[in-house]
């Protein structure tokens, strides 16, 4: 497979994933948003573990820098996801 065909395929798959993701997310009713957010937080936790493993085995060249950025972004994603989920759950609690 030539390299130009490879990149065309990568861009095509990415565009298809974006289109499918937008279509799926727009169909989620608000009542299901919190449970789905919790599920995506669990998946983000798995991503964080993978990023940490990549950082452990990376040397401090470009790979190490990318691994550090990956761990940082995955951590922000997990913490932010749980903060948003907690805030949404607060909306459903009875006020005193």
Image: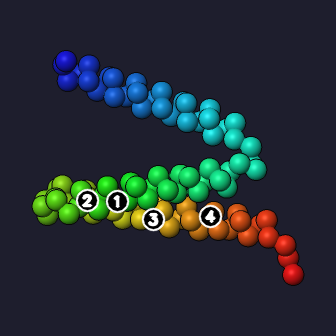
Task: Kindly give the residue lying farthest to the right in the view shown.
Answer: 96
Residue 93 placement, left or right of 84: right
On the image, the x and y values in percent for residue 90 come to: 73, 70
Calculate the distance from the C-alpha at mark 3 to the C-alpha at mark 2: 17 Å
Q: Which of disc 1 and disc 3 is earlier in sequence?
A: 1
**Pointers 3 and 2 in contact (C-beta within 8 Å):** no
Q: Which mark is residue 76?
A: 3
Tag 2 residue: 53
Tell me whether the residue at label 3 lies in contact with that at label 4, contact meaning CB atoms closer than 8 angstroms: no
Earlier-in-chain disc, 1 versus 4: 1
Name which residue lies at 65% across and 53% down: 35
Q: Secondary structure at mark 4?
A: helix
Q: Earlier in the sequence, mark 2 or mark 4?
A: 2
The residue lying at 26 percent from left, 24 percent from top is 6
Which residue bears the numbered disc 1?
49
Q: Pick whichever of labels 3 and 2 is earlier in the sequence.
A: 2
Mark 3 / mark 4, whichever is N-terminal: 3
Q: Nearer the viewer, residue 47 or 84?
A: 47
Give the image quarter of residue 22.
top right
Q: Secondary structure at mark 3?
A: helix
Q: In front: mark 3 or mark 1?
A: 1
Quadrant where the C terminus sits is bottom right
Image location of residue 30, percent across then percent down? 75, 49
Res. 18 in view: yes
């Amino acid at each position: 497979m030539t390299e130009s065909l490879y990149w065309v395929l990568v861009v095509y798959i990415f565009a298809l994933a974006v289109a499918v993701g937008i279509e799926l997310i727009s169909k989620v009713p608000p009542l299901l948003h919190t449970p789905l957010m919790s599920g995506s937080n669990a998946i983000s936790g798995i991503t964080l573990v993978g990023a940490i493993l990549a950082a452990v085995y990376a040397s401090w060249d470009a790979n190490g820098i990318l691994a550090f950025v990956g761990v940082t972004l995955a951590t922000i994603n997990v913490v932010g996801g749980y903060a948003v989920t907690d805030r949404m759950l607060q909306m459903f609690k009875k006020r005193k």
